[in-house]
Amino acid sequence: MIAYLEHFVHGNDTESMPNDDVSALDGAFHFGATAAAGKDFGGMKSVKPRAVIRPALAGDVERAVKEAARTTYLTVAARGNGHSINGQAMAEKGLVLDMRAMEDHFTLLSLDDGSLYVDVSGGALWEDVLKRCVSEFRLAPRSWTDYLGLTVGGTLSNAGVSGQAFRYGPQTANVTELEVVSGKGETLVCSESQNSELFFATLGGLGQFGIITRARVPVQQAPDMVRWIRVVYTEFGDFTRDAEWLVTLREGDGFDYVEGFVFVNSDDPCNGWITVPVGPNQYFDPVRIPSTAGPVLYCLELALHYRNQDHPSAVDMEVDRLLGRLRFVEGLKFSVDVTYMEFLLRVKRVEEDAKANGIWDAPHPWLNMFVSKSNIAEFDREVFKKILKHGVGGPILVYPLLRSKWDSRHSVVVPDSNIFYIIALLRFIPPPPKGPPTELLVEQNHEIIQLCYNRGFDFKLYLPHYQSKENWMRHYGDKWSRFVERKANFDPLAILAPGQKIFSRIP
Ligand code: FAD
């Protein structure tokens, strides 16, 4: 083991290494290969860590942080599944903790009041949490991401948003207790009532305050089936009015999932009509599109949960009642019935196809942001209809969220308005020379962000990434001093999550 570590300490970086002794890192640690930890899904950054550690228990995480603190320079990055875009889970010449290696922790808890929870490892994939909850207990968490190949600790460090967030809030609002190793190397259990400041700081905290080793997630009865529906709009105003109405309906009174996306009004195979149908043998008939339609069209994606014993006609009636109030284009409605698991794992198929086509491992210059309802029509006019009128080679998500479902005590920041939209440009472009240079697409992202600043939009980047402290200060606005205070309290040497590039390691 010593020899292995020596490879990093003395073999590769002899020139640049400070003289501190890191041999104490050796011992019961399990080390992993560094190549994967130097890359991420974004595929645009690559940095070499000093070592990759595979912790089994919170105690291993604690020891790694303590050992880093003994040096004047070592940083520690928890790596979930490395699905960040801009190197956020990397640690240049630091220690990367491969959180997927954490011991599988999965316990069902039932409280006196009848509420149910699962305790899961911070390094667990949501996909595995889903499978175990449903197959072992017919239960499920309430709030998801679209894609489940992400870790519990990774999404809770950001927010975790999907079509259920309008009702239950993001995943950060659906956790009642965390076990966290702080930047001081202390393992603490925290909740709203115990070590509450660490709890609030960690949720949406970009990994800055502690490493999540366990999370307690409320669960409820899982439905058996889902009616998965897509309806098409030509007018953005109709689309947003309907979407906003749907997200204000009470539970049991509306759909269980509401999302939306923009697509190109053409037969383009990656960006056009063909991306809309959900079931096999469904055909998008462009003759249905009114001649007044613009360069892009909009699609509401909806889902209604039901149980096997529900009568099909009752499901039909409920869907018809809700769809009857919507102003989508007649004839452009697609629907399919799938199991709840098939629905939640729907993006897995996209992953498999993208891997087969070589675009899963290509660079992904994605952009995610939250834009206030008050600016969304202008965003549509300037960005969807102009800058992105030819699409992004993948989904352009746009759907409303309710600010009341977000807890302002958490570290994540969102626009001020009661309704804001998540916008996600999920670019899947073949690598150059087949596709455009990645820099051009990054440039297009900057153009969009700059437009939002220039027009004074009330917006925030989601999964943010900035080059300068000034930009981070602007991002957090009046929450910046709270963020800095929390850092001083929980990670005073700025050891954690250096890849976010918010703070520099204090010697
Ligand atoms: P990583 O990328 O490995 O880590 C992200 C950050 O969290 C890093 O700073 C890391 O140091 C820190 N971190 C990781 N684990 C821990 C831990 N245990 N404790 C503390 N800090 C930790 N997001 C959504 O909200 N909704 C979606 O529908 C959605 N879909 C996605 C689909 C795809 C294909 C991809 C690539 C991303 C998607 N995301 C989505 C974004 C995703 O939430 C983020 O990438 C997030 O970072 C989770 O990825 P990860 O678990 O791989 O974490």
Image: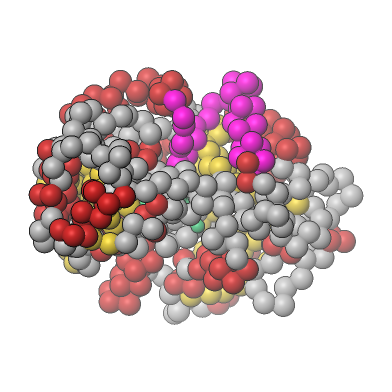
Residue at image point 20% right, 65% down: 103
Q: Quadrant of the N terminus?
A: bottom left
Q: Is residue 408 above or below residue 241?
A: above
Left or right for 49, reference 166: left
Side of 488 where 349 appears, left or right: right
What percent of the width, then of the height, locates residue 502? Answer: 36, 31
Q: Is residue 60 above or below residue 159?
A: below
Q: Magenta span has 444? A: yes
Toward the viewer: 475 or 43? 43
Q: x%, y% of residue 95?
A: 26, 48
Residue shown at the point (60%, 61%) measured from the top left: 359
* Quadrant in which the C terminus appears: top left
Task: Identify the residue shown where x is 63% and y is 41%.
Answer: 439
Q: Position of residue 48 (x, y in %)?
A: 37, 48
What x and y, as percent, mark residue 250? 45, 50
Q: Can residue 418 be seen from the camera position used here?
A: no
The correct choice, above or below, for 251 with respect to 139 in the image is: above
88 and 197: which one is in front? 88
What range is drawn magenta here?
440-468
Question: What residue appears at the point 18 percent right and 60 percent down from the top-left corner?
Answer: 3
Image quarter of residue 136: bottom left
How is colour applied across the structure in the image?
secondary structure
Residue 431 seen from this side: yes
Number of marks: 0
Q: Is residue 46 left or right of residue 357?
A: left
Residue 95 magenta: no
Looking at the image, residue 133 lies above or below residue 401? below
* Image quadrant assignment for residue 324: bottom right
